Image: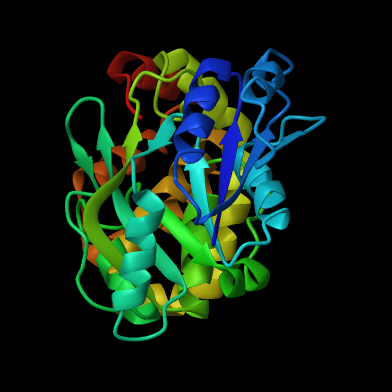
Amino acid sequence: MFDLAITTYKRPALVYAAVKSCLTQGPMLEKVIVVDDASMDLTREAVESLHDPRVLFVQRETNGGISAARRDAFSLSTASWTVSLDSDHELLPGALEAFAGLLATAAEPVDILGACYKWDTGRVSPKSVPRGILGYRDRIHYAGLEDSIGSDYLCAVSARVRQAVSWEPLRSILPDTLFQLDAARVGNAVFTPRCLAFQKSNAAYGYTRGTAACRLARRRLDANDALQATRAIMERHGAALRRWGPRLLARVLRQGAFFAILSGDRSLARHWLKTAVMSSGLDYHAFVLATISFLPAKAVEMMYRARGTR
């Protein structure tokens, strides 16, 4: 049995479509948990208009970001498996059956199931998934490869993972990496190259969408939490990343360095960039970040706006 955990913020039409796609998944669906991150709009009315007893709607009183909303959703899950969805996703027909089939044919016990998204632009993410059972070491290795499981993928975790690992209620994209690494240490993973969900590219309030000015403002809001998440990743998984995942280590530290620059801690940014370069070599992103770490804040803002960079 599967619970579907959906988080949303100011997307009533999109979350309506997401929940509706979940309700057609058949007898393996136990419930759909929708956590609204304090939208204060018509999200509740949109979800409750479906009039389905399998839907549990929860509205947070204050906006805490997607990881805090996921933490709340997972705490309400009671099924043997929990699938995490954003409100700009829709499950494709037969998705839960496909996950169950993946689980049934796994050569060893697994606690993490993964599949691909098909975007409305036609692209698929991730472009490639590894075959076979992945333990902690392999998971770190493949997550560092280009266009592999370090990017967005549809994820289901067992109750064992759900009970052992919690989403850190921190803003930014880094808590997702932290959760995935924590989960990988608890149980094995298996992936299917099939697309089991649909993702929309033009949804409002997406992390990589909107104007450069809006994205920059959001990243400034996230900066302190992102630094906490980066430190937690290094404390819990730094040794393993150095040994088995130098590319993933470099990516985490580059992300952390960018947020350190935004928070004004230039020395921390340079320290993390130095570690990233020592891990996997100098690349374009590390070079750019190292350069802007010496520029005044106003110049950094002008560069970000001009380039429209993510």
Q: On the rendered structure, is 304 left or right of 205?
A: left
Q: Looking at the image, can residue 223 be seen?
A: yes
On screen, residue 260 versus residue 307, left or right, reads: right
Colour scheme in use: rainbow
Q: Is residue 255 above or below residue 303?
A: below
- Quarter of image, res 203: top left
Residue at the (26%, 32%) spot, across then down: 119
**Residue pictured at 39% horizontal, 65% vertical:** 100
Choose between 289 and 294: the one closer to the eye: 289
Residue in the foreground of this view, choosing between 77 and 255 = 77
> Residue at 37% across / 61% down in the picture?
99
Q: Is residue 273 visible?
A: no
- Against 194, is 224 above or below? above
Query: Looking at the image, which is closer to me, 48 or 211?
Result: 48
Image location (x, y in percent) of residue 289: 35, 40
Residue, far front: 27
User: Residue 290 at what x, y percent from top left?
Assistant: 34, 43
The quarter of the image holding the C terminus is top left
- Say which quadrant the N terminus sits in: bottom right
Place residue 39 in its image quadrant.
top right
**Quick check: 225 above or below 233?**
above
Image coordinates of residue 80 in percent, x first then y, are 58, 67
The number of numbered discs placed on residues in the rendered structure image is: 0
Most extreme residue toward the bottom is 108
Across and down, in percent, residue 237 comes to: 49, 73
- The one nearer the camera, 8 or 51, is 51
